[in-house]
Amino acid sequence: MSVVIVLILALTRLIPIYAKVHGAGKICDELGRISLSTRPHSVSITDFGAVGDGKTLNTLAFQNAVFYLMSFADKGGAQLYVPPGNWLTGSFSLTSHLTLFLENGAVIVASQDPSHWELVDPLPSYGRGIDLPGKRYKSLINGNMLHDVVVTGDNGTIDGQGLVWWDRFTSHSLKYNRPHLIEFLSSENVIVSNLTFLNSPAYTIHSIYSSHVYIHKILAHSSPESPYTIGIVPDSSDYVCIQNSTINVGYDAISLKSGWDEYGIAYSRPTQNVHIRNVYLRGASGSSISFGSEMSGGISDVVVDNAHIHNSLTGIAFRTTKGRGGYIKEIDISNIDMSRIGTAIVANGSFGSHPDDKYDVNALPLVSHIRLSNISGENIGIAGKLFGIKESPFSSVALSNISLSMSSGSSVSWQCSYVYGSSESVIPEPCPELTRDDDAYARAAV
């Protein structure tokens, strides 16, 4: 394809954002108004010897292409164009001021050979890997300390071929922690859009210690039986927008995190100012939307609106436990349509494990100022299970305009302990603890 056509196809570089975003509910509008301009330089992966037959390993071609395009960073940036074909590769890193563009019919296929994946140290806010202690495999497409990066296309596909990793996980034969499909570490001004993601070994998109991340018009899919696969994970990141996307995975569709126990407390970087809207979500054995359980750096100022969640074990979940520290607060969730959900709303103060035995059992998490409104649901097993912590009850949980149609055979609609708040126009009627938001009442019950 000629350079002229490639330049026309090129999605463009991200202009850095300097204007302050006021309120999490405006973040998607702000990020969606980013001015885009065509990258002035473009090359095809075939220029570096890549072969799209699904058999030839192209890791070196991707690495060489990115290395070459680094020279254009101060010249307006560049695009790496991936034409139709099946492009087998191991993990490779991106560079700043780069657009990775997958044409319609282009499939980046992850190698199933662990030797094709670089090993890296655990994340400092976790202290170890999620699956097991020690090192982790680097994500298929990754970037560290990057600025102005776009991963997009004309509905191209990135296939993680996760089955082999899922089998290793369930058979306890993993030597190191599973890789993700895309991970941006300590980066800013990132766009991921107009792509299909299939069969991630673990997380599909992981933003960690990053800022101004715009995820738009993506489809993420993995088998309902895939173990602990998660769609999008904003992790110790801020100013994040996730919108106009469909996520169907094995565990959690969208999960907000911020570090694990003493490691997350020490790193002390929260996830905050996140806007999620216009999404279709399924978390088969987990939640459509979850907060935690690794939330030791704190999670706050999150707006979720206009979401359809279906065929999930739980709909909306807040998870933590003693020893986590941190907080989950100032969360607004509204205009949610649920169908075929085991438990619609979960708040669990004794969820999850610890990375090691060095955590402080007296590091109690704070869960407060959670607002859920305008939620409808059908074929719901249980309306809510809200179990706080005796030493740190969940407080200021406000429910309003919620109507849940219970599935046949449901005998218990709500279960609550150590949680306090208010409710208005909620069907079925919630627990007595959620009928008034009174600090004195909460203290008297402890």
Image (cartoon, rainbow, N blue to C red):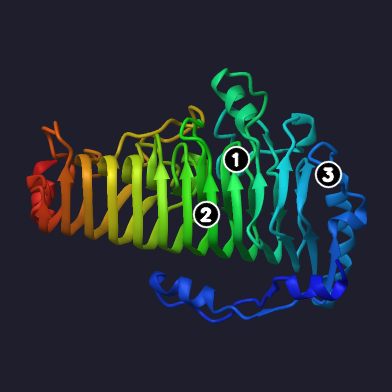
Amino acid under disc 3: Thr
Around disc 1, counting alpha carbons within 10 Å, would you say few (fewer than 14), some (14 to 19), or many (20 or more)?
many
Marks 1 and 2: which is nearer the front?
1
Q: Identify the element where label 1 is drawn.
A: loop
Tell me the residue that label 3 is attached to: 59
Residue 16 image position (x, y, % from top left): 64, 76
Q: Nearer the viewer, residue 139 or 358?
A: 139
Query: Is 352 left or right of 366, judged from the image as shown?
Result: right
Amino acid under disc 2: Ser
Where 324 falls versus 13 (above or below)? Answer: above
Nearer-N-terminus badge (2/3) = 3
Q: Identify the element where label 2 is drawn.
A: loop
Residue 251 image position (x, y, % from top left): 45, 38
Q: Tell me the CA gap for discs 1 and 2.
A: 21 Å
* Residue 292 visible, this orientation: no
Amino acid under disc 1: Ser
